[in-house]
Amino acid sequence: MAENETPEKLANEIPEDISDLIKSEDTVLKIAEICFDNGIEEDEKIREISYQTGRVLLGDLSPAEFQKILEEKAKLTTFLAGKIAREINDLIFYPVRESLATIYKTEIASPEKPPTGPSEEKPEGPKKADVYREPVE
């Protein structure tokens, strides 16, 4: 949140479906369930994961940075942070993806063009006789 933005001003800029999601007790329960299902039971880690999820929903943390921040701030392994990030993406972010896209419109970059060098396809080797075919009579 920028220094000159008040919570009220920020709340007015958030799409209604995201605002409802942030206020919903169901969201908190989903995050807690995801944490428990992945063996995270420490309150501090669950709070941090919830906080970072809220930052994404409020437009303060890019979804692309979400996993990395979970690793750093919640002190999760790369594997566990990736698994939790995917589950939160599927259960929480995906239903409001269109609204998230409007929030992050300036941060969503167009896909890079593929390299124009020689293709990396494997050349086909010499064809061998099919040893599994039965002789035709």
Image (tube, rainbow, N blue to C red):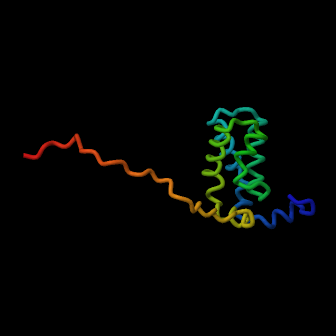
Q: Residue at x 77, y 40 (%)?
A: 72
Above or below for 96 versus 46: below
Residue 58, compared with residue 40, is above or below; it is: below
Residue 76 place in picture, x, y as percent: 72, 36
Percent across and percent down for residue 135 are 13, 43
Q: Position of residue 108 (x, y in %)?
A: 70, 63
Q: Is residue 97 left or right of residue 6?
A: left
Residue in the image at 62% along x and 56% along y:
94
- Reply above or below: 87 against 102: above
Q: Is residue 128 left or right of residue 110?
A: left
> Which quadrant of the figure has residue 15?
bottom right
Instruction: In this rendered view, identify the residue nearer to me: 56 or 121.
Output: 121
Tell me the residue at 63%/63% (across/down).
Answer: 111
**Relative side of 28 to 37, left or right:** right
83 or 33: nearer the viewer: 83
Instruction: Describe residue 23's horizontal placement relative to residue 125 as left or right.
Output: right
